[in-house]
Amino acid sequence: NILIPLVLANPYNDISQIAIKALGESKSNLAYPVLTSLMNNIDDLSVKANLQKSLSLLKLSGVKEDITGEYYKKLLANTPVYKCFVNFPDGHGNIGIIFSRKNEAAFIQMFAIVINDIDGIIDCFGFNEISEQEFDRIVNKFYQNDKIIEIDEKLCKYLLTNAEKISRLKYQEISYEYAAWSMITKDIDYEDINLAQNLNSIELNEVLLDQLYNKGYFDKWFFDTSNNESFEKIIEKLNENKIEGINNFNEIVEEAKSEIFSDAFMKIFNQRLLIAAHLLELSDEKTFADLTYSLTKESSTKETFKTDILKRSLYEYFLTKKERYENLKNATSIFTRKANKDLQNIDINHVKQCIKTIEDNWI
């Protein structure tokens, strides 16, 4: 329970090398699949040598098979899955997941995690032996005003496993907290779920797109400069050529679309839409699920959808800048000096002019 999460989180550091050696000496059937999996998915020759040595020690002690599923099914038999929740994905590809189990004494064990379709696992925390009332408070606080959907443990496992794969491919490690808490999902078999199985593609138009917008599903679907380099370049262009930029908002947006919505990004974006559609289907909103699924297909309406997201992103950016300026302007006491310095970096007249131009032309 200590060594395996440590090795899974980051198999490359010095502490993990000690843990890999200890697992080889453990004579534990649970160590075998972990070491085998790492052996098959790691390129570092030094780490592979340690893994091979530990695997050889396990085999010499008679450990040669994976009993993980069987072991955890027995271990967790008296703590059935309680509730699993997700929220509707936002425009950055973030999804919040809560997984929980309840024991015979009616206490709940749970963890909450944020995953992202570009970066994988973002953050994770958990609680042991809490009451239903405490669980409900945590759920409400974690999701706040987001639309949440209760899902089964199979979909939960699907989302978690794929997020873990993204993290390992991009960063070669995962958070230790997730590596530890994910142990309470080990009795659940992974299934490659066909999210589109019950969804239908229909011919879209702008009237149907407006119906989707009116439901508020995509209110949080916009980019910002902190997680999208292409969008940051648009902002830089607008800020460098202020007068020209304001006069050519529509042209700038159209030119930027192909760069932001590149082929590589569209694969991620379409999967994001597919997950959103599947969650709407689970919420018994079949019509809107089909409309959202239809946005994964190329069409003139999808081009409008992409343009609208980009426009909304610009509007949100400048509104946020205006709000920040006003907050800094009202800063007092020890924060005043820093606030004054930050104020100088915001051209409020340009910001206001951009907001006015966007509202006059797009809203």
Image: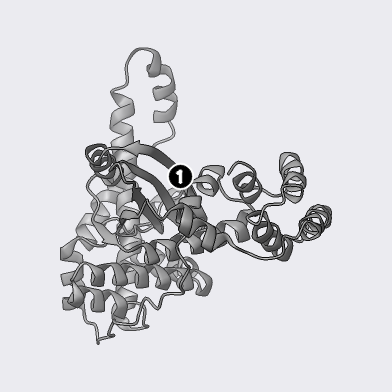
**Displayed quadrant of residue 19:** top right
* Residue at the outermost top position: 333
Instruction: Identify which residue is drawn at 42% across, 18% down.
Output: 337
Query: Is 254 in front, or is 11?
Result: 11
The quadrant of the image that shows the C terminus is bottom left
**Displayed quadrant of residue 350:** top left
Instruction: Identify which residue is drawn at 55% across, 46% down.
Output: 175
Using residue 323 as the reference point, say whether residue 259 is left or right of it.
right
Q: Position of residue 161 (x, y in %)?
A: 50, 62
Q: Position of residue 173 (x, y in %)?
A: 62, 51
Instruction: Identify which residue is drawn at 45% across, 63% down.
Output: 188
The quadrant of the image that shows the N terminus is top right
Q: Position of residue 343 (x, y in %)?
A: 39, 29
Q: Is residue 331 above or below residue 155?
A: above
Q: Is residue 210 above or below residue 92?
A: below
Query: Is 182 in front, or is 351?
Result: 182
Using residue 271 as the reference point, say whether residue 209 is left or right of it.
left
Would residue 234 be seen by someone viewing this image from the given angle? no
Amino acid identity at mark 1: Cys
Query: SS class of the residue under badge 1?
Result: strand
Would residue 151 be seen by someone viewing this image from the given angle? yes
Q: How many marks?
A: 1
Q: How is the image coloured?
A: one colour
Q: Report the residue marked by disc 1.
A: 124
**Displayed quadrant of residue 63:** bottom right
Using residue 26 as the reference point, say whether residue 184 is left or right of it.
left
Using residue 111 as the reference point, say whether residue 121 is left or right of it.
right
Query: Is 195 in front, or is 179?
Result: 179
Query: Is 33 in front, or is 360?
Result: 33
